[in-house]
Amino acid sequence: MFLSLISWNIRGLGKKEKRCAVRRLLADKKPRILFLQETKMENFTPVILRNMGCRQNFEKAFSPSIGSAGGLISIWDPEFFEASDRFIFP
């Protein structure tokens, strides 16, 4: 199995331009796992995930930002990986 992953300090996902950049990256590189740091997001709605180019079946685990600092999200394709436990500590 070919493993491809991307880890990116995105420095905020609040603007549409950043979400479009993630969408282009996912379409171009097709990683199995995507790690984004410093999202500065308190929540990830289905609309935000769609805007980022994530398919509905993608799984995720995230840690919200505290104000405008921090925020992590891990997104993966469940056809290639299965999460048995998810631990993200703020």
Image (cartoon, grey):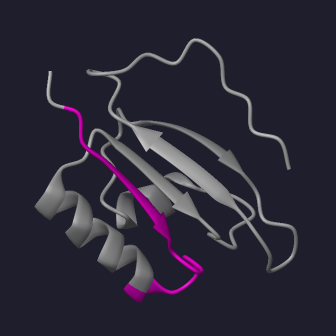
> In the image, is residue 46 above or below residue 15?
above
Locate residue 66, reporting x and y percent.
87, 68
Q: Position of residue 88 (x, y in %)?
A: 75, 38
Return the x and y of residue 8 as percentages of the image width and height: 45, 66
Total marks placed:
0
> In the rendered view, does 22 fall on the left or right side of 61?
left
Q: Position of residue 86 (x, y in %)?
A: 67, 25
Q: Tell me which residue sits at (27%, 22%) in the image.
A: 80
The quadrant of the rendering that contains the N terminus is top left
| Residue depicted at 15% across the width and 30% down the height | 2
Q: Nearer the viewer, residue 57 or 35?
A: 35
User: Which residue is depicted at the point 65% across and 70% down?
Assistant: 38
Q: Is residue 13 magenta?
A: yes
Looking at the rendering, which quadrant does residue 56 occupy? top left
For the question of whether residue 47 can be seen, the reply is no
What stretch of residues is rendered in magenta? Answer: 3-17
Residue at x 69%, y 58% (from the top left corner): 43
Does 78 appear above or below 53? above
Vertical order, 32 against 49 (above or below)? above
Residue furthest top in the image: 84
Is residue 61 visible in the rendered image? The answer is yes
Image-based side of 68 in relation to 6, left or right: right
34 inside magenta stretch: no
